[in-house]
Structure formats: C-alpha cells, structure tokens
Image: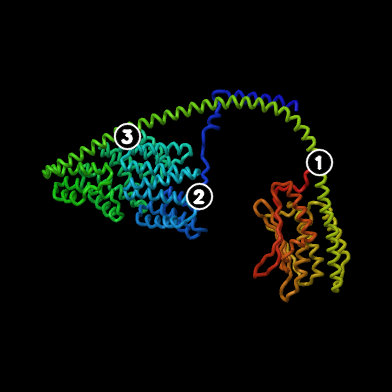
Amino acid sequence: MKRILPFALLVVALLSVYLLSPWSPVKSSLFVGGHRHHCAAECLPELYVEGEEALRSDDLATGRRYAAKGQQEARDSDEYYRYVVLEAKCHFYNMQADSFLMTHRRLKQYLQRQQREDIELKMLQVECDMQMGVYLTKMAGLADSAQAYNFKALRLAEQLSCYDNDRLLILNNIADAYKQMGHYDKCIEYYNAAMELGDTLGMSVSTRIALTSGIASAYSALHSFQESDMWWNRLKQLEPQMSKGEHFNYLNNRGNDYYLQEDYEQSLGYFLRLDSLTKDDPDMLWERMFCFCNLSGVYIKMGKTDLALPLLEQAERFFTEQNQPVPLFYLTTQRIEMALLRHNLAEAGRLASENPTPSWMIPEQVMLRQEILIRLYEQTQQWQLLADQLKHYHELKTAIAGENVRMRLAETLMRYEHEKSEMTKQRLMEEREELFRWTLASLIAAVLLVILLCVVILQKRREEKMKDALTKSRIQSLRMETVRNRITPHFIGNALSAEMMAQAEGHEVDFDAIVELLHRGIELTGTELTTLSDELEFIGFYCDIESRSIGPDFHYEATVAADVDPQHVTLPAMSVQILVENAIKHGLKRKSPVAGQRRSVCVSVARKGAATLVEVRDNGVGLMADWQKKERTGLRVIHQTLDMLNEQNKEQIGFGLENSTGPAGVTGCRAWLLLPDHYEYKLKTV
C-alpha cells in the first residue's frame, strides 16, 4: 500500500497537467459526434440490406434476385412489402417507368388498407413517399408535384428520431427537385443541410459524391462557373471511389457544365467518356440513351449533323417508349435546330407548330427552344411571331437573370450565416472544453481523497475475502470428493448385480474376472482424472464381463479417429464408463433379442474444432419419456462433476443424452461428451 499511494498521486498529477494543456484532444473525443445509432436498420431484414448494397454497387441483377427471394420467404405482410420496396428500386434504377408505377401502386394500396400505426408501417410510408417524389422528379419531370411527397416523407422521417440516414436522402431529393424547378438558392440550401447532417452521421463516400455533385451542378446552372469548378475539382478527387452509376452522373454533369460555358470540345470529351462507360451494359440502357441526347446536342452545336442524326433517332425511339417528356422536348428542339442548319425551313416550322412549349417545362429547356425559334422566325421573315418570341425570350431571360442574382445573393448570405454559425459553435465548444478541463481537474482532486480512504477499506475487505475464498475452496474440494465417492458403491453394486443375474441364468461365474474388474473400478473411482486410453481399456474389460450376462448377440465396438491420441486426452475418471454402463443396463438388457440382429454399444472418438468428441451409441429401447425426473445415480454423478468443473473454466465440457435413429432406421440412445483441449480439471485452490 505504501508503494501504491505515491504512484497514484503521480498519475493524477500528470493527468491534471495533460487535461489543462492547450494540445489536449479532449474536444475531439468528447464533443465531436460520430455515427448515431440507426435503429431502423435493426428492423430491416438482412437480405433486404444486402439487396440495397447490390443496387449501390450497380449490381441490378443481384438486387432483383434478392427482391424476388425476399417476397417468397417473407414471414409476414410488412416484410413482404419491404421487398416490394426493393423491387420498385430495381425498376427505378433500370428506368422502367411502367414497372416502377405498378410495383409502387401495390405498396401504396397495402398502406391504404392498414388501420394500425407502428414503426414498420411508418418506415414503409416513408419509402412510399420517397419513391413517388423521386419518380416525379427524375422520370416524369414534375418536380413541383414531387415536393409534396418529399416534404411529407421528411416530416414523417423526423418523427422517427432514429431514421437519420433516410432523412439525409430525403434532403438530397428535395434539393434535386428544387434544382429541376430552377430554384437554385433553395437547391443549394438543402444540399448544404444534407451535407451538414451527413458530416454529423459520418456519411459514406457514395453520399458525399452525390451531394458534392448536386452542389456543383447547381452552381453550373447559376452560371457561377468559378464556384462550380471548385466543387467539380473536389469531386474529381473522389472519382477513383465512384461506382458506375456515380461515375455516369459525374461525367454527364461535368459535360453539361462545359456545354453551358459553350466549351463544346471539352463537353464532347466528357460525353464520349460517358458513351464508353455505358457501352455494352444492358443495365445502363436508359443512361446510354440519355448520353445520346447530350452527344447529339453537342454535335449539332459543332455543326456535325451527320453524327448527331443517328444518335438523336435512337434516343427518340427509346424515350417515346418510356413516355418521358423532358428528354423528348429537348430532342425536338435539336430536330428544329438541325432543320435550320440544313436550311429546311418548312420542316423546322412544322416541328415548331406541332410541338408547342408546355407550361411546366423547366426554364433552361424553354430558353433553348426560344433561341431556336427566334432564328427560325427571323429566317422565315415571320416578323410578328419573331417580335412576340423576342419579347417572351427577353422577359424570361431577364426574369432568370434577376432570379439568378437573387439566388446568388441568397446563397452568399446563407454561406455567411453558415460560417458564422460554425464559428459560434467552435467558440462555444472551446469555452466548454476549458470549463470541462477545470471541472475535471477539481473532480480528480476530490476523487483522490476518496481513493485514499477506499484503499484502506479495500485492503481490509481483501483480507476477509481471502479467508472466505480459502474456506469455499476447501468446501468445493470436499464436495468433489463426496461426489466421486458415490461412484464406488454404485459401481460395485452394478457389477455384482450383473454377475448374480448371469449366475441365475445358468452362466458360469468367473470370480477372478469379477474381482479384477472391481479392483480396477475402485482404483479409477478413487481418482479424479484419467486418460482416454485407460478409460477405453477399462470399458473393454467391463463389456467383456457384461457380455456373459447379455448373451451371444451382444456387440461392443470402440473407434478412435486417426487424428486423436487417446494417451493425451484427459477426462473425469469413469465418465464414459458410466455412459456405457447405462447403455447396457437400461438400453440393451431391456430389449428382447431379435433373430439375426445384434444388441450393440459403440464408443466413437473424433475431433470437433478445438475439442474431442466422445459418443456412446446403443440400439436399445431408448430413453423413457420421464427419464429426466428419474435420473440414475451414474448420470447424477456426471452432471454434478461437470457442473463443479465448468464453474471454474471459461470453456465448458459439453454433455448430452438423447434418443437417436441410426442407419436403416434403427433407434436407440446417444450420449456424448465434448472435451475442450485446454481445460483445467483440477479444482482451483487459494
């Protein structure tokens, strides 16, 4: 104790100096949050989670297979429709709009039929609303309608306090929809909110890629190319870690950025890389056709209409089948521009009149169409239409320019507020850290005084516990000795009973053999441990004597696997012998002889992991229904011996007794012992 006290004082002093020093890492370990527990993930079936992982890795075939398998093996309706969610995601990733809507409708109808409210149902409702929001944004081009579903999903996810991962995804979807609507200030606001939440959760690289790409694209649409280049360069550093789908989005959006800057050579380079990425991949057919839209647009701007036409025609056929209006509107604009380049004014006029601009079309596409129509009306000298179109064009351009200025100002103010908030948080954390250090130092000083008092008390208690432990150790040894002593009279009684029965049946009695058996049995019962080799030798001797009372149809066999050395396997003495004795006495002797069939008991020894498995099998009458209530002396000895030994070992000796059916349907009983390699058989003493 005199040596411990100065050392404890030194440790406390050093710890106090460390906590009060400016380079202490307490802030990072106590104030910076990591992953928050996602309790929703605990409710998700393992196969569903693996299916989502497959989709994130662009392995759509595996995702579809898991969705089908999950629906077949679902334990209840909620789990079944969880896999319907996965099926809908597979259709969305394949851009199969009709299949997606049919699958989504099944999920929606199931939710409408339910009259209960629980976490699983709310999770499915979040997925349902999220899916419709993404569909309306990405497939139908109805971003304003999508927001109703997005915000509904967000409100429900916020009620599920542990559903943060999906809340992050919903924030990203809201930002995507605002980007499509042209509300880039709101778009950047929600992307930043998602980025902040993602940093708190410790988001994956995949999520960071999606958010960074969204922010960069929003700045591109704002024509803030200096800011967009900064974000695109950040994204380029993550390119080696991108999945195929993420790589597609990066190349496509970076190519669009250069297209908006009218740098068509750079834009073409990215779109050609996009073409190589999607080539010969049946799971990326939609992406390939979308790439054809962009490639044909760039070729037309470069005056290469012969290269643009076949790409445009393929894309038109595909998106007509898919019934996707936004890509078709853009392709029609390209058709009109191509007709103008070829001086086919009649064709250009026909296309313009047959394909008016819908009121819901996104502003960028409207302006592209108006620029082409101004050229058309100028070349055809339709002055009134030209004047009207110029008026609408300048009104829209002025509105977009004003909106862009407003959005840039709002985004700048938002960035300022964000940085100000971060600085305030940093200052508060530093103040809390300083307060924490002084509080902790004071607490340590108080704890030190308590420790000094506790050391004295603990020392006295330790002495008392040593006395108690010594007493318990002696009691345990006496218990083991008592249990082992019960084997001797039990064994002697059974052996003499067997000889008396043999004599009563007219068999010759070999007193030398019975005396030798009893002598060796008493030697074994007087020891706690023996080797498996000695145990098997004694069992063989015992079965040889028992065979005289059973009859000529008795058969005993012992098999030891080649990788087992019985000389080096230790076990409690007579533990296997008792199992063999029970098999003969209560199994074989109660079974009437059958002509042509032997009554047998077999002992087999084999390795099982880091243990040795000893099995005793017989083809007797088996266990009675109430055998556990009428447990015999031998089995009680085994149970009590193993219980006392297992109390002091981390690894446990296994023991079992059960009815079994062998080859050709032969029934009987199986008893087994599983002996760990590193097991302490000696009772521990203090």
Between marks 1 and 2, how big is the CA–CA gap?
55 Å
Q: Are marks 3 and 1 in contact (CB under 8 Å)?
A: no
Return the residue at label 2. Answer: 119
Q: What element carries label 3?
A: helix
Residue 48: % across, % down: 48, 52
Q: How crowded is mark 3: few (under 14 residues within 10 Å), some or many (20 or more)?
A: many
Q: Mark 3 points at which residue?
A: 407
Residue 504, percent across and down?
86, 72
Q: As shown in the figure, which amino acid type bears the numbered disc 3?
A: Met
Out of 487 and 141, give the one closest to the viewer: 141
Label drawn at residue 75: none
Residue at horizontal 52 percent and vertical 46 percent from the top: 39
In the displayed structure image, the side of residue 497 where residue 567 appears, left or right: left
Q: In this view, does 63 lie above or below 398?
A: below
Residue at position x 73%, y 49% from top? 646
Q: Can residue 536 be seen in this view?
A: no
